[in-house]
Amino acid sequence: MALTKKQMQEMADVLIKAYKHEIVDEGDWWYGTDEHSFNIHTPNDDGWYNINVYDTIDGVDNTDTWVDLDPVYLGFPK
């Protein structure tokens, strides 16, 4: 079952809370479920992170389409 945009945002919020330090350290972080892949990344290295959610098809990310969630400020690596 596909997630709604609101559910995707809620899941991204949980992931950020649980993995914030790892996300900031990596700068381009991925997390996959059976149906979606979450990519949280800072394209400009300015502390702001974009959140893109891709559908997965048979375990492979469908990068042809995605959902953009609201960017979030997480800061810089320490």
Image (spheres, grey):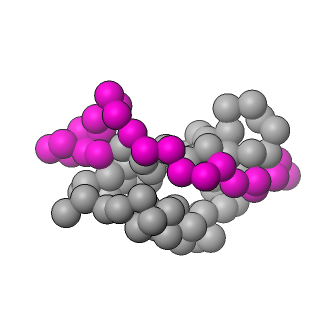
Residue 10 visible in the current orientation? yes
Whether residue 37 is situated above or below residue 13 in the rendered picture:
above
- Residue 7 x, y percent position in the rendering: 41, 67
Residue 25 visible in the current orientation? no
The residue furthest left is: 58
Does residue 76 belong to the magenta stretch?
yes
* For residue 39, side relative to residue 70 (left or right): left
Does residue 43 belong to the magenta stretch?
no
**Residue placed at 35% from the left, 62% from the top?**
4
Which residue range is magenta in the image? 55-78
Count the numbered circles shown: 0
**Residue placed at 75% from the left, 55% from the top?**
74
- Residue 26 x, y percent position in the rendering: 64, 44
- Residue 56 is drawn in which quadrant? top left
**Residue placed at 69% from the left, 54% from the top?**
72
Nearest the camera: 1 or 27? 1
**Residue placed at 79% from the left, 45% from the top?**
47
* For residue 46, side relative to residue 49 (left or right): right
* For residue 58, side relative to residue 21 (left or right): left
Whether residue 72 is situated above or below residue 7 in the rendered picture:
above
- Residue 18 is drawn in which quadrant? bottom right
